Image (spheres, grey):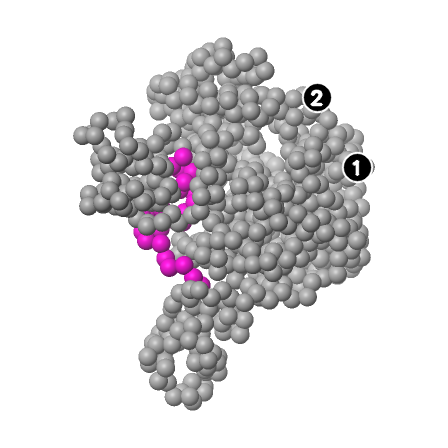
Amino acid sequence: MSVLRLAVPKPLRRPFDYLPPRGLSPADTAALRPGVRVRVPFGSGEVTGYLLSIEDDSSIATKNLKPALTVLDPEPLVDASLLQLCHWAADYYQHPLGEVYSTLFPRHLREGRASAPAGTPGFRLTTRGKGLPADALSRSPRQAQAIALLRRQPEVSSPEFRSHNIGAAILRKLAQQRLVEPCVISGRLPTVEVKPALRLNAEQRTALEALTGTANGFCCHLLEGVTGSGKTEVYLQLIARCLQGGKQTLVLIPEIGLTPQTLARFKARFTANIAVLHSGLTDAQRARAWEAARSGSAHIVIGTRSAIFTPLASPGLIIIDEEHDSSYKQQDRFRYSARDVAVKRAQLQDCPIVLGSATPSLESLHNGVSGRYQHLRLTQRAGTATLPELRALDIRKQSLQGGLSAALVSAVDETLQQQQQVLLFLNRRGYAPTLRCHDCGWIAECPSCDARFTVHRRQHRLRCHHCGTAKPLLAQCPRCHSERLLFAGLGTEQTEDYLRSRFANWPIHRVDSDSIQGREAMQSLVREISTGEPCILLGTQMLTKGHHFPGVTLVAVIDTDALLFSADFRGEERMAQLLTQVAGRAGRADQPGTVLLQTHYPDHPALLAMLSQTYAQRATQLLALRQASGMPPAGFLVLLRTDCANADYGERFLQLLRQRCAGHLGPEIRLIGPLPSPMPRRAGKYRAQLLLIAANRKDAQIAARELVAEADALPARHGLNWTIDIDPQDVF
């Protein structure tokens, strides 16, 4: 008897056994390889499972085994190294294997539909198009050009059409006239052309030589370069060498907003097929990009976090840009770090990987110091650009308008008069973080979270930024019925209102998740800013992540104090990274830059360190502090969280779990908790957590497996859910 052992995409940490589909011969069953998709009944429905192995027997009686419905693929759609990566990730992050497998595939494949033919999307002439008279499209020169191109070449890929300035709209019109039809071009890859590169400075040349010296085999490089040092140019020249060797490159970026700018720069350098993968695409777009990467017709794949699981026909290089960014860590369900998974993938596929950042994470710096990573540094800005000057603005006893002091307003005015651009950073969207009654002190709070509503005055709404609850903006206090309601605190909308009244003659762009919506919004804004015309940019972290604004010469942090105080042990590291990244937007061209930090605490040690030290110097000090405390990267963390409608039950569950595990985890393991989370209630559920600290990774993994095994064995009543987070980014 043959038994199909499958991983099923359900939150269950065990495989499931099925009989082969009816009608499948023993020979065909024996020929099945791990990784093929199998459609199976599960509960009252059907799911797509993934074959792990074929067994001779099962622990379940044969009469109780269900037959699979159908085998969907004759061969696995992904190679063995990606399957091995899934097994590693499932084990390391303690997540059900079936759900990890699902991350490999686009939606239509997870739903059990057929895989599209491998190849490059393109067009060919229909019978009607072949018989079209030569002068039939004389009034439509672009359409005539497309027809002429197809007469010279039976099938033409979409990238080739674009290289001749023939866009999708022209091809749609021809298809509507039934003159052309879409096709998939197989067996012929688009020609790669590399346009002339920029001249490198001495540091860039040294880094490139070191990177290309280990181009054939696994090696992890940490490229630490100050903002504006030309890391992207090093990437481009490294990618060019990879493409010349017939290999593909996978590039990860932290945010969708960076995609247009990154894609534009890559297209300006390479005439190649570039596939893009991120959550802003339609299912059909993601499927086409995935197939292009898998078939090898995409030379370069650019994507956000989940793109790390994209199959490649000929992997040659992986690049993780802004590797320190917290966006690379998935914060729900499968809580993986794309950066760390990328390093493991490069090892399994025996290809080099580059982690780049102006402000590397302490984990990566620690690996560089210990010799696990090759650490390369770019300490100078490219070309004639110089690093900006940082100054603190003491705003104690100062009158503030829209959060801006008189000195900052004057600096903004002077910069605009010099026909230069200004960037103002305020990491708080909305109009104000609090709505308060002036008479009785009532505060508008979210009914589902231990958090306050944020005022969104433009939308006339109160919104919770934690659970998404929203309600109309109140006109009177619900407790005392007073109409004297005050907006307490500062948000980007409030600052924007002041800027528009004070600088009415200058363009002002607010950049946050409320104002930048739609696939083209950020791209359109970047194009406008890149013209260099004087303007004011006001925004949140969306403005700090790798954007190149050569016209910005003044950067100001409106509320530096919000970054100075954090209960998280990573607070100082993140403040240093964020302020360095914000400051790095200034003076990236010929004009020198200035960075002003508004603060009520000009003597704060962390702020003084920012003003007097480089990020590299500060990071060295923080690494020493982590070593002394045993916190990451000197130690390793595991966090087990519960959420439950009953506040007491979550803590009792964790207390019992601690009691069952404490005796055999070993003396080198520290357990802290159970404790309520910093926000004890979110989205109507009470949250508690148990923190595990280990001195080394091996002990942390063993302890994590023990925690999961014991938690699985405990009854979870009252609707309790628990999750485990390996290497958590947010502890407090």
In the depicted structure, whether residue 549 falls above or below residue 647: below
Taking the spot 28% from the left edge, 25% from the top edge, the residue there is 59
Q: Look at the picture and state if 650 lies above or below 426.
A: above
At 70% across and 21% down in the image, what residue appears? 628
Residue matched to label 2:
628
Residue 465 at x, y percent in the picture: 50, 38
**Rendered view: 92 above or below 132:** above
Q: Which residue is mark 1?
A: 613
> For the residue labelled by badge 1, is the local secondary structure a helix, a strand or a loop?
loop
- Image quarter of residue 24: top left
- Where residue 203 appears, as percent x and y from the top left, is 77, 50
Magenta stretch in the rendered image: 97-121
Q: Is residue 171 above or below residue 75?
A: below
Residue 34 shown in magenta: no
Q: Of callouts 1 and 2, which one flags the residue occurring earlier in the amino acid sequence?
A: 1
| Kind of residue indicated by mark 2 | Ala
